[in-house]
Structures are given as structure tokens and as C-alpha cells.
Image (cartoon, rainbow, N blue to C red):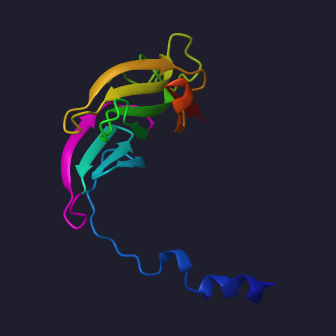
Amino acid sequence: LVAALAAPASASRPDAQNMSLEYFDSNPDFITSDIAFWGDTAFVGNYGGVRTYDISDPANPERLADFSCFGPQNDPSVWDTDGNGEADLLVQSVDLTLEGPQCGAPQSLHPDGTRHDEDPDGWEGIRLFDVSDPANPVFLRAIYQDCGSHTNTLYPDLERNRLVVLNS
């Protein structure tokens, strides 16, 4: 049994072949979550907000913004709402109870400093941003979700002229 389990571990991983690290932009203050891509722009969620990059030159990406908006998980999805070919809406998942939906709202805590995930006055869910200028994201509004949003997926329902956000 030991030999059988050890054999796969010694084989090279097929998903890592022919891959190399082209760029690294550290963010030691916050954990990076997911990345959404639209054309030559990458939207990188992290627990402190979102970073945007021009990736037209993959070997030399240019950071456009480091937008602060605390909220774990901060997984992003992007969409072109006006049909001009550029992403202009960013949907961001927040999976931790905060004192409010706005950027800068702190984590909800009990008086003794421990997490207060059941805070009846707290907020967690989906935030919406205007990213028509990826260098200057603008908070639009927030939608409360009971138990928050760990991640989201966008489903364009073109027949009904709507964008559906699937929340997990």
C-alpha cells in the first residue's frame, strides 16, 4: 500500500508542465482571493479590496489601482453592461460580517473583541462597483445576503435583458 501511494507522488504533475512565473506583485497585508479577466484587464480580489492591472504585456503588467475596500472573500466577477466591449461592472463577494456595507466598514466584533458573525445589525453579501475606468473603481451599492457571499458567478440572461448573480 505504501509503494502504491508513493508512486503517483514521484510522477511529474501534468498541469504544471510548460508553466513559468511571469510576474509577481506581492500584497503582504491581505490574502489574494480570485481573479477576473476582461480583455487586457485583470481584476484581482484580496481581503483588503481589489487591484486592477493592464495585462496587455503579460511579461510586464501595469498596476492601475489598489482600491481599498475591506471584506473577505472579495471574489470579483466583471461584466460589460453597456455593450461597448469593456467591463464596467464589478460584482464582489463578501463572506464575513462587517459593521456595514460601505468600503472601510470594520469587521463586526463582540465587546470582548471576538468575531460577531451573528450580529443582527451587521452586513455581508454582494458589493457592486463601477469599473468603467479600471484605475478608479467606484462603489455603487451593496446587497445584503444572509450568510454572505463566498464567491459568485455571473449569468447573462440576454432574453430578459438582465444579469443574474449566482451566489455561493
Name the residue: 56% across, 11% down: 120
Query: Residue farthest to the front?
Result: 159
Which corner quadrant of the image does residue 141 belong to? top left
Which corner quadrant of the image does residue 6 belong to? bottom right
Query: Residue farthest to the right?
Result: 1
Give residue 30's position: percent from left, percent from top: 35, 44
Q: In the rendered view of the protein, which quadrant contains the N terminus?
A: bottom right
Query: In this picture, is 150 found above or below 99?
Result: below
Q: In the rendered view of the protein, which quadrant contains the C terminus?
A: top right
Give residue 12's position: percent from left, percent from top: 55, 85
Q: Please indicate, yes or no, whether residue 104 appears anywhere in the rendered image.
A: no
Name the residue: 63% across, 82% down: 9
- The residue stretch that appears in magenta: 56-75
The verdict on residue 65 being magenta is yes
Q: Please indicate, yes or no, whether residue 64 appears anywhere in the rendered image.
A: yes
Name the residue: 21% across, 63% down: 57
Give residue 79's position: percent from left, percent from top: 40, 37
